[in-house]
Image: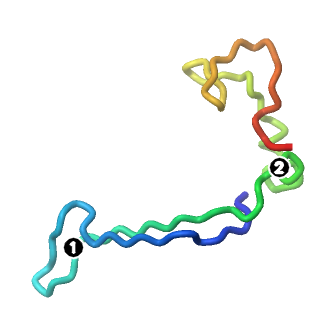
């Protein structure tokens, strides 16, 4: 889940791929970029008490993907250790 956020930045680019306009002068493309920041960091407790609790409980940092890396991108050796990367 996503916590409450604040909008930090808005950018509008009327020519993301070089200037091009219709006959009336309006741009052909417009890119709107919105930058948000969560107001509260996720913690183990907030994850465990959220709607994604089942995903949290089923998380196994040592179950590698196809290239034998875990979620942090570190090669899995299946020897244990680590907390799963969530803040306490």
Q: Is residue 55 left or right of residue 23?
A: right
Mark 1 or 2: in front is: 2
Q: Quadrant of residue 38?
A: bottom right
Taking the spot 84% from the left edge, 38% from the top edge, the residue there is 57
Where residue 83 sits in the image (x, y, percent)?
82, 31
Q: Is residue 88 above or below residue 63?
A: below
Quadrant housing the N terminus: bottom right
Q: Is residue 56 left or right of residue 10?
A: right
Per the image, label 2 sits on a secondary structure element best described as: loop
Where residue 26 sits in the image (x, y, percent)?
21, 82
Reading the image, the residue beneath label 1 is 28
Taking the spot 79% from the left edge, 12% from the top edge, the residue there is 79
Q: Is residue 58 above or below residue 9?
A: above
Toward the viewer: 53 or 83?
Answer: 83
Where residue 56 sits in the image (x, y, percent)?
80, 41
Reading the image, the residue beneath label 2 is 43
Quadrant housing the C terminus: top right
- Do labels 1 and 2 touch, CB within 8 Å? no
Crowding near pointer 1: few (<14 within 10 Å), some, many (20+)?
A: some
As drawn, the residue found furthest toward the front would be: 8
Q: Is residue 64 above or below residue 19?
A: above
Q: Quadrant of residue 31?
A: bottom left
Taking the spot 71% from the left edge, 12% from the top edge, the residue there is 77
Residue 4 shows which numbered tag? Answer: none
Where residue 58 sits in the image (x, y, percent)?
80, 35
Crowding near pointer 2: few (<14 within 10 Å), some, many (20+)?
A: few
As drawn, the residue found furthest toward the bottom would be: 24
For marks 1 and 2, the one nearer the N-term is 1
């Amino acid at each position: 889940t996503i916590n409450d956020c604040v909008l930090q930045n808005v950018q509008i680019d009327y020519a993301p791929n070089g200037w091009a306009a219709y006959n009336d002068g309006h741009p052909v493309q417009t890119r709107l970029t919105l930058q948000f920041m969560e107001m509260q960091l996720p913690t183990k407790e907030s994850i465990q008490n959220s709607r994604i609790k089942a995903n949290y409980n089923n998380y196994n940092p040592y179950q590698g993907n196809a290239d034998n890396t875990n979620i942090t991108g570190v090669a899995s050796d299946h020897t244990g250790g680590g907390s799963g990367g969530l803040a306490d």
